[in-house]
């Protein structure tokens, strides 16, 4: 075993690792992409061995840190094993881009397909194809939804505050949706792009900010749908097409991001429809959805502190200085200090990945393990 230092990074190299390095140096005649693939395969194997070595019964805590802030990540041992196996399958099929090499993302896809690896891999493949065709990876930079303020008048919705566990709260006032006026302001295609953009913003900004504020990993939301006044006028062909398209995107490409949903102000007619719809849903999904009548306030307050809940839902918040709660964007993601940490995490992770890629052809071992950890953009292990 020997140690060296490259750009301030300590590297421990074992005899086996020196042999791997020699193999890489002696294979200069091979195409570069083949050498890189070989090295990535060894890195995957090292990561898998590390995962197996940490296995314990039940759940374990993964203590991760952002600058001076511990982030708790409780993981089930069985799920870790499943993710490790799924990761190997994705890698072998060349379906694991660096930006999506994320434990929690892979776990969500496995859960969506009840841990059937083949079905989850097919779902993952379709997700990657869609992202490439839709331009999802760069949609935050490429798309500007300049009509948002006007759209919110006809489709009131937005994130506001966090629940008692620190998850972002998403709200829609469905009874106030005016589809005909909405399509005079924007197109269905542009609204879908905005919908996808907001999902990407949640993963890049809102979930990391909430994780830092709560000091534990967060990647799901609590949703409130107010159906007061919902009628046929709200669900004409335009509205049905829009909802159907958003549901497909949510279910196929961003699965398992809902923690729980409260449908409030549900009248007798809606409850009758729901009793039919519920029977068609997966029991695990339907168990997350709570259909409540007009007396819903106490249930919401069990999940969301009054200071985080809008006054029109029985809370104490008005956001009067920001144009109302649905215009305020209230939450940890609006805290400049927290967002500075979030952006520094992302910049540091990308910089470290590039740094490791530059030396990956000649150095194996702990640097590569470091790269695998760094790719978890929301939580960084202490180095």
Image (spheres, grey):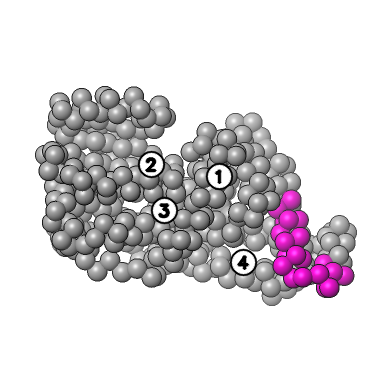
The circle drawn on residue 323 is none
**Spatial CA span between label 2 and label 1:** 22 Å
**Spatial CA span between label 4 and label 1:** 27 Å
Residue at the spot 56% in from the left edge and 67% down from the top edge = 350
Quadrant position of the N terminus in the picture: bottom right
The circle drawn on residue 207 is 3
Magenta stretch: residue 66 in it?
A: no
**Spatial CA span between label 4 and label 2:** 30 Å
Depth order, front residue of 219/133: 133
Labels 4 and 1: the sequence-earlier one: 1
Residue at the spot 55% in from the left edge and 60% down from the top edge = 99
Asked if residue 72 lies left or right of residue 368, the reply is left
The circle drawn on residue 258 is 2
Labels 1 and 3: the sequence-earlier one: 1
Q: In the rendered image of this protein, does residue 127 appear above or below residue 359?
A: above
Asked if residue 269 lies left or right of residue 141, the reply is left
Residue pointed to by mark 1: 122
Labels 2 and 1: the sequence-earlier one: 1
User: Is residue 284 visible in the rendered structure shown here?
Assistant: yes
Residue 33 falls in image quadrant: bottom right
**Spatial CA span between label 4 and label 3:** 21 Å
Q: Which is more foreground, mark 2 or mark 1? A: 1
| Residue 358, percent from left and from top | 69, 73
**Spatial CA span between label 2 and label 3:** 12 Å
Residue pointed to by mark 4: 353
Quadrant position of the C terminus in the picture: bottom right
Badge 3 crowding class, 10 Å Cα cut-off, few under 14, some 14 to 19, many 20 or more, is: many
Element type at mark 2: strand
């Amino acid at each position: 075993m020997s140690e060296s230092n490259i750009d301030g990074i300590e590297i421990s190299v074992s005899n086996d690792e020196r042999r791997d390095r020699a193999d890489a140096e002696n294979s200069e005649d091979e195409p570069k992409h083949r050498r890189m693939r070989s090295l990535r395969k060894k890195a995957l194997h090292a990561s898998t061995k590390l995962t197996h070595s940490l296995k314990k019964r039940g759940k374990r805590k993964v203590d991760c840190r952002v600058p001076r802030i511990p982030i708790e990540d409780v993981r089930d041992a069985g799920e870790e094993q499943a993710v490790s196996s799924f990761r190997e399958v994705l890698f072998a099929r060349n379906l694991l881009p660096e930006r999506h090499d994320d434990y929690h993302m892979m776990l969500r896809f496995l859960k969506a397909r009840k841990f059937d690896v083949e079905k989850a891999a097919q779902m993952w493949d379709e997700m990657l194809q869609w992202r490439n065709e839709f331009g999802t990876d760069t949609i935050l930079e490429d798309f500007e939804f300049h009509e948002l303020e006007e759209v919110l008048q006809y489709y009131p919705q937005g994130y506001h505050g966090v629940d008692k566990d620190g998850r972002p709260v998403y709200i829609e006032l469905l009874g106030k949706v005016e589809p005909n006026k909405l399509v005079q302001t924007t197109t269905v295609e542009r609204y879908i792009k905005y919908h996808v953009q907001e999902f990407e913003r949640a993963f890049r900004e809102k979930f990391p900010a909430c994780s830092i504020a709560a000091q534990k990993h967060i990647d799901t939301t609590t949703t409130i749908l107010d159906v007061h006044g919902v009628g046929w006028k709200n669900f004409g062909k335009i509205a049905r097409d829009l909802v159907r398209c958003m549901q497909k995107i949510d279910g196929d490409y961003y699965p398992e991001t809902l923690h729980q949903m409260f449908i409030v102000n549900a009248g007798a007619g809606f409850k009758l429809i729901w009793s039919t719809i519920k029977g068609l849903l997966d029991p695990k999904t339907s168990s997350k959805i709570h259909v409540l009548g007009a007396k819903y306030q106490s249930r919401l307050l069990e999940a969301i502190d009054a200071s985080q809940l809008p006054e029109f839902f029985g809370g104490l918040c008005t956001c009067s200085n920001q144009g109302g709660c649905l215009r305020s964007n209230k939450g940890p993601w609006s805290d400049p200090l927290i967002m500075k940490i979030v952006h520094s995490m992302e910049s540091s992770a990308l910089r470290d990945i590039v740094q490791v890629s530059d030396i990956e052809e000649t150095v194996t071992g702990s640097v590569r393990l470091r790269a695998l950890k760094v790719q978890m953009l929301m939580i960084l292990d202490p180095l």
